[in-house]
Amino acid sequence: MKRRMIAVLLSGILLCSAAGCGKEAVTDKSTAASSSQEVTETPAAEESPEASSSSADSTAESASASTSSESSGDEGKEADKKRIEITVPHKDGMEALYDTVDGLTVEKGSYIAVVAKDLSAGFWKAVKAGAQQALDDLNASLGYTGNDKVYMTFEGPENESDTNSQINIIDSVISENPDALILSIIDQQSGQAQMEEASDSQIPVIIADSGIESDLITSTCATDHAAAAKLAADHLCEAIGNSGEVAIVAHQYNTESSAERVEAFKKEIEEKYTDVKVVQVNYGDGEESIADMLKNTLETYPALKGIFCTNEDMADQTLDALADMENTEQIQIVGFDSGEEQQKAIQEGREYGTVTQNPYGLGYAAIVAAVRAIQGLSVDQKIDTGYQWLDKDTIDLETNQKYLYN
């Protein structure tokens, strides 16, 4: 089994160093690739079979989810844990379910590496929480504890524009020979060499959210970006009375998810709303700030009536920029994702609504797909994790809480 001897030796060293303070051993998995990598999660010996596995990020403590952690004075006891509600659509023709670990089995100590686009974003913290819950469920179902647990590392740059750092992280992770790699690529023009190296090392690659065109990918687990963006276009046109000028604020030029959302939004406008015109597309990965870009846009198009923001960060920056400008109350904002700032803006009427992804389900489904690939089971080539429209009338509904995160 890959890395088994290394994992056992490392865990033994960590346990010896941790024994004096009575705390669970955790590895700080630093590499030369990037100083922005998160602490990774490795299996640690437990005081009892009931002790919890590594807890997910604190950002999962939202209206729809909270995670457990052990208090320093209560070794061997697990804090109350509220499960995240996981739903992943099962479409006709799909060969497997991706919101359950029932029936899955994998070798003890298996290691799944995850490389995200942006460790600072609430979306990716929610993805991590969903992935950790899948691992918790899997280990519980298989009775794996301590060093036998299936575990993951979760790494990435501190912002979604740092392509070079991400490629270095991917190289480092592949060199560790994980049993599977879950990957979200920043730049769809990069990563081909890494896909070839993973294939040569027989490491199955699961794309999560954004990827590249490659025959070496096992599966793509993502939102249907085009369909979701078309829904955003429909609602923005509704908000502006199906007439007027609108702009797009997109997160990146070369990221697959961003490109698909921009093109689908524009196409929906062109085909269905003849009195609406997309006058400008601004990208957040350039040298100019979102605030400066929007200022220039409004100077050029003073009658602008709406803006579509393609992810959480772009929506937050757009809302902040417009708040500092005069005479922008008439501009309707439709976003993508559902972070804390967007939730507040929708409730206050500053954002018309948002098309939110299903980050907890995305993280869970990616782990299930990875485990199936490790096990040698069939994995669907496309796994659509779903999306939901949220506005002031629907954001507080109980059925929609699973789409929200902080």
Image (spheres, rainbow, N blue to C red):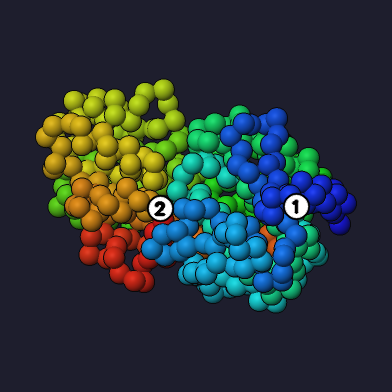
**Res. 219 mark:** none
Eyeballing the image, is 401 above or below 331?
A: below
**Res. 406 mark:** 2
Q: Quadrant of residue 284?
A: top left
Mark closer to the observer (2, 1): 1
Eyeballing the image, is 380 above or below 220?
A: below
Q: x, y (%) of residue 159?
A: 50, 35
Residue displayed at 20% across by 40% down: 245
The kind of residue tagged 2 is: Asn
Q: Nearer the viewer, residue 182 or 305?
A: 182
The CA span between labels 2 and 1 is 34 Å
Q: Nearer the viewer, residue 354 or 29?
A: 29
Which residue is the site of mark 1?
19
SS at mark 1? Answer: loop
Can residue 373 be seen from the camera position used here? no
Q: x, y (%) of residue 147?
A: 78, 60
SS at mark 2? Answer: loop
Mark closer to the chain start, 2 or 1: 1
Left or right: residue 357 compared with residue 180: left
Eyeballing the image, is 288 above or below 181?
A: above
Crowding around mark 2 (Cα neighbors within 10 Å: few <14, some 14 to 19, many 20+) is: many
Q: Quadrant of residue 164?
A: top right
Residue displayed at 62% across by 48% down: 154
Left or right: residue 127 compared with residue 195: left
Q: Nearer the viewer, residue 318 or 152?
A: 152
